[in-house]
Amino acid sequence: MLTGSKTTFKVRQMLPDIKERMLSQSGVSARSRDVLGLRCLPGECVLQRAVMVRKKLSAREGRGWVSGTLFCTHFRVAFVPQDSPKPDDNADPVLLGDHDVALASIEKVVVVGPNRTKLVTPNSSLKFTPEELVLYCRDLRVVCFLFDRLTPDAQVLEITYTIAKTYQPPKPGSVLSFQNAALGSVEMKQFLSNRRRNTDMNWFESASDWEHELERSGASGWRVSSVNDRFEMSTSLPRSIVVPQKVLDTELKKSFAHFNEGRIPRWCWRHPRGSDLLRMASFQNNIYHEKDDIRNLEMILFGCQSSLCVVVELDEELPSPADIQLAHSRLRALCLGDISTSVSVPDDKWLSTLESTHWLDYTRSCLRKASEVACLLRGGHLTVALQEADDRDMGCVVCSLVQVMCDPHCRTQSGFQSLVQKEWVMSGHRFYSRINYHRDNDKEEAPVFLLFLDCVWQLLSQYPSRFQLTGDFLLALHDSIHLPLFSSFLANCQRERCKRSQNPGQSYTPVNGWRDMLHPDSSSDPSDPPLPSVWDWSLQYSKHRRDRFTQPMPPIPPLQPLLNGNLNTNPDSHRLTDTIPGSVFLLSRGIFSCPANLLPWRSGSSGVYKKSHRRAASSENVPGLERLLKAWAQAEFPQGLTSSSGPQGPLDPYEPLLPLLMGPCMGLWRECYLRGALHAQAFSHPVSANHPHPVERLAREVQQLKDKLEQVSTGTDLNPPTKMAEPRRTDTNLNQNTNNGTFLFPASRPQSAGNPRAAPPPTSTNHQTSQGFPPASAAPSRPGHRDNGGSNKHTFLFGHSSVAEARPDQRYYPAPQNAKLPKSNGIQSAPPHDRL
Amino acid sequence: MEKSGSIDSLGSKRSSSRQPSVDSLSSTSTSRSDRSAQAKAASAMSCDSGATPTELSPELRVKPKTAAKQVPRDSDKEEPQLLPNETVHDMAQDVTYFCPFIGAMRGTVTVTNYRLFFRCMDREPSFVLDLPLGVVSRVEKIGSASSRGDVSYGLVCKDMRNLRFAHKQLEDTLRKSIFEVLVKFAFPVSNGLQIFACEYGQVFPENGWKVYDAVSEYKRQGIPNESWRVTKVNDHYEVCDTYPSTLAVPVNIPDEELKRVAAFRAKGRIPVLSWIHPESQATVTRCSQPMVGVNGKRSKEDEKYLQAIMDANAQSHKLFIFDARPSVNAAANKMKGGGYESEDAYQNAELVFLDIHNIHVMRESLRKLKDVVYPNIEDSHWLSNLESTHWLEHIKLILAGALRIADKVESGKTSVVVHCSDGWDRTGQLTSLAMLMLDAHYRTIRGFEVLLEKEWLSFGHRFQLRVGHGDKNHTDADRSPVFIQFIDCVWQLTRQFPAAFEFNENFLVTILDHLYSCLFGTFLCNSEQQRLKEEIPKRTVSLWSYINSQLEDFTNPLYVNYTNHVLFPVVSLRHLELWVGYYIRWNPRMRPQEPVHQRYKELLAKRAELQKRVDDLQREVTNRSASSSERAGSPTRSITPVQTFV
């Protein structure tokens, strides 16, 4: 019925046809392959295909064109290059191939005909046979397919209509059907439910996860409280929060009311110099402060530092979510260009138009704020509390940026994933509302997380060798945001996520009825597919792409201090020894002040702390703090730049990576935003001029060599009783064995071929066999570590999900005061529920 | 070559005697990060204190002979390390230098016949400014004596910076200020002195004057062949005094006819071969504009000549003439007797205008750029300010033009003729960039030197006029940053194809630094004829002598020799960047955060090391498995299959 005629026909007519074809093509076996080499997901069916199609390759892919077959399934638009290797039927399913586009990430479908271009909507009809098909994606990709003259016209038209019909223009309700298309099949559900979780990272889901973070950063004086275990205290906070040890849960409970949404000051991270980083929402002002309350509030706010607390105000200088949304939409419009409307900014206005989006200004202001905080922290022995009205947007950005700058662990892939898990997913960034998958809440939409990724990219581009993760990783994360498939992003807080994951016993609905925004109709519909986490990368990307997520060579701290020309790096000159206990300052616009109403309970009426407050405001202290930021401020006004800093000793690896923030230093993330820009080239060339970036190639080569070496060395360097677990399998074991609660080793390292650390094969054999506790031999296997007085408790893990303990590489602070771990503390070791 | 031994020993002497100051002097450049880490530590400090202007002393690394023989100086001494035949002419204490980044500081100024040297001892580490006088464009006394009796001088430099000094009013009114003395040596040409390059007596192990030989370069390209010949018609520069003596022309045009063609081309710059495609025989030829004039004059010989160029390429029956100018400008040139080829007169030729503006527009654009980047950058309007200079837009047009030429030659297999008005500015930019895209040989260090020697120096880019070496007349309308633009375009190419070039950013910066420094003879004079007349190769040292003697400083560790690859860069402004490492390098806050090259080298070393280990281990495995086959049950038995994984 569909002929090659170029006459008009309505897409609607095709609907039954699609259904029909779906049925006919979704073969007997769900794992069947299409004849032309598309590896289908379980339950996925091909709706339409077109042969002899060429795909335009980006500069990263080597430019030029590659020919192959184009498919449209009800989940994705897939492209299989002609000479691609035969798919392996036994491999685990990967959602998207290297050339594929998920339907949900398509934003617009445009066809280019002989003399014209046309936007194709589900209802549009074509009066010509397209020569080119252009898919504009939400993640700023532009994918371009060229039809050959030999492609049958009928196929061209049909696949165009099919894509236009099925790509799900943004409307409420389409998300669920997309999820079902991707993950809804029985096989897929089963596959997902059997999936093991990545234990290299900290998921921050349970109290023990937080305890590990405390231990890793060497923070003493803090404990994990489960006072919010049923989300009674704050609906948006996670179950476990970290508070000062000296505050009891009963006391703690009274403080929630003093903060917006109950988001009390919580510990996030400790700087190796002993400063603590806290986050909180704004104060509730219209509340009566009882004397006891005040004592507790002060204790919570000051944490373990008795002397000094700096409240960093985030709302004023940083962009609001609405600003970010506007800037991002402008940036999109600028970078994508648009064939169909030919509204593309002319080249000679590119720079000023880019400037007028303000996107770079916003990244700069976030980085600047984070740099300020990082400088404050390195002064040592103070508490820095980031305060934002609702503590769910810029608080996440700044808090995590500070950690990326200061903590080398956060610059590794697993560390970064843990960081996002800690500061974004668990601490209640409203991913679901901010991304607005359902297109039903445009007011709330704001790509705050993407702004954060851009900031990280800026750091990465200025300090490429200080990161273990790569730009490819950031890009993958950027793109994943646009797929409504991941539990990480499909909820606004841990509470919603718990509800989604059908743990009714653990979630709790308050009497006043918390509206389930997620699934108004089918919140507990058991047919919903289980949603994977975004960190399950092997589900999304092929191994070859995942290999590019990390640098093959671990970053080494450089030998000399990196003066970026804007900081006096001598820490001792900034020691704030002279501060009076109990001083609170406000840092706003780069200036310290001590406004009377900073802490509502100290101001005016209550009067209890008035005296000490006055004392704190004495003039001696403010200059001390001013000094702290002075060097930083000097960077902004080069006239004041001093060169007083003398040569340093060996570089402190925790020296913050302070980015250069001048105009010419803020780059545009071209690999992300200009990936698809079709107008970029003056005219296109079929000749591929260059291959992937040589550093990448070099990196890959090094990786391959390492792999090879790993294989060879595991065999040769180890002495006899090697029951030879196959080297390739060590990795998979690492991933799969996580629920056993066994101790895991970091992936064996080829560099250490000759040293005792490289003894993984015996252990991998061990943990294959052991179900419960690891053999005692596991303990000495962590030679790089602080001696725990013989305690091998790290190797005993809690039975449930908290296997994440085995991250020996993450611990970085062998400080002496650390000998007393929070976990070994009597109060702490009690199960959380006992304290309620 | 036999001198290399002495250099080595000198080098070691240097490292023992004045390590600290050399490090602080030489390692401040933006991308010269592949120095040793220790050196970096020192330089990082000194860069913070603004000791950046010492960029131009990399030659210190190859130790000047005379200075080495002198008493080893402490880096604390107030005098600079002198080059051979460099002499101190004046010194002044208590001079204030107003650094726009650090602030005012007092110190000592030394003026030699080569440089201005300022050192401030009050700071730790001491601040040093080392400025070759060739960089100075003009010296101006700013204002009258202030109330405190200070006189202040501004030095406007050719390399994107201005310096300001002040000192006390001299009591002895007869005595000249040090800055008056400086003027004499900064502008030797105007003062009847010799340019320092003619005195500089450094001996390098390599002789850069031998880098380029026209005949062997043509030979490399396969010339002469059946369609092209090498002619000596210009041996005495009689046909064209701005062309080289050796030219490649179509075989069937006799020398006599060449002279008649020369009469029709501006300044006698006839179309001659720049590059020939090794396979298709499509050629890039360059010339000046035809003398068409308002009356539309024609020249039979010229028409026949272009036909011969087209016929030399059997693959195509078309010829593209790229006129670099905007069509309006080309038309305006008719009033002055010039113009462009009419398509009526030249059959099968297609004329394309590339819209590149003239030297005056470019000069103005760079001036605006300097205003935007030095000394302070307005962050909030940085991009729109940059846009308003149009600098990147000009870069884009030049690259786009070169890309079209390269595309016609490579993809279209068509010969092209390139010209502008005189054929020594825009034409040189276009042909050399196109050749860089087309021929991998020019992307090596020596190849690039050949390219500069050939397309720029021998074909008469007027360096003396465009740069104004030693000339105090800074308002001369012939000054223009044409060559800087070209190097900028090359830098853009290296950004887009990081592995395609054997040289690194440091190489390009060094070339630009010595474009002004007047230390080497390479960029002196306007043409081959002048250079020969002035005996430049005999009297001066070539820049390539210096560079080729320490190649490791200029090598790109990632270089992969893609022999047959043609580079087609993306020329959209969206993918061009301002060359921060050159234009904003004086700003201490712009220093790159990371020694990227260091990282590359580490990766390369790591790869080599791993490769070696893999090889070793595999060898061991094979050995063992060989022996284990004798002793059954050997533990390594299970390993063998692993090798299949490659």
Image (cartoon, rainbow, N blue to C red):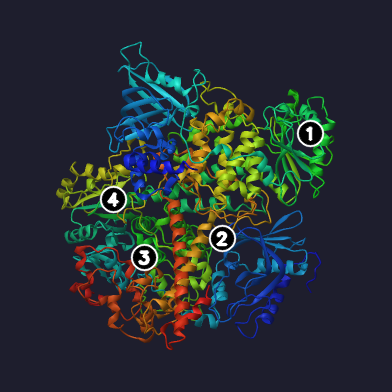
Mark 2 and mark 3 in contact? Answer it, CB < 8 Å: no
Residue B567 location in percent, x, y? 63, 51
Q: Are marks 3 and 4 on the same chain?
A: yes
Q: Circle 2: is it few (<14), some (14-19), or many (20+) Cα within 10 Å?
A: some
Say which residue label 1 marks. Answer: B341
Q: How many marks?
A: 4
Name the residue carrying label 2.
A138
Label 4, secondary structure: give it.
Answer: helix
Q: Is residue A384 left or right of residue A33?
A: left
In the image: residue B249, left or right of residue A764: right
Kind of residue at badge 1? Glu
Would you call the spot at circle 1 few (<14 residues within 10 Å), some (14-19), or many (20 or more)? many
Alpha carbon separation for disc pair 2 and 4: 38 Å
Please state the horizontal and vertical placement of residue A541, each as a whole percent of the image: 52, 70
Q: CA distance from mark 1 to mark 4?
A: 69 Å
- The answer to which of marks 2 and 4 sits earlier in the sequence is 2
Image depth: mark 1 or mark 2 in front: 1
Furthest toward the front, the residue is B2
Marks 1 & 4, CB-CB < 8 Å contact = no
Q: Position of residue B623 (x, y in %)?
A: 46, 78
Question: Do pointers 2 and 3 mark residues of a single chain?
Answer: yes
Q: Earlier in the sequence, mark 2 or mark 3?
A: 2
Query: Would residue B382 be seen by someone viewing this image from the given angle?
Result: no
Q: Nearer the viewer, mark 3 or mark 4?
A: 4
| Chain bearing mark 4 | A
Which residue is tagged 4? A376
Q: CA distance from mark 2 to mark 3?
A: 26 Å
Quadrant position of residue B61 = top left
In this orientation, which residue lies closer to the viewer: B471 or B279? B279
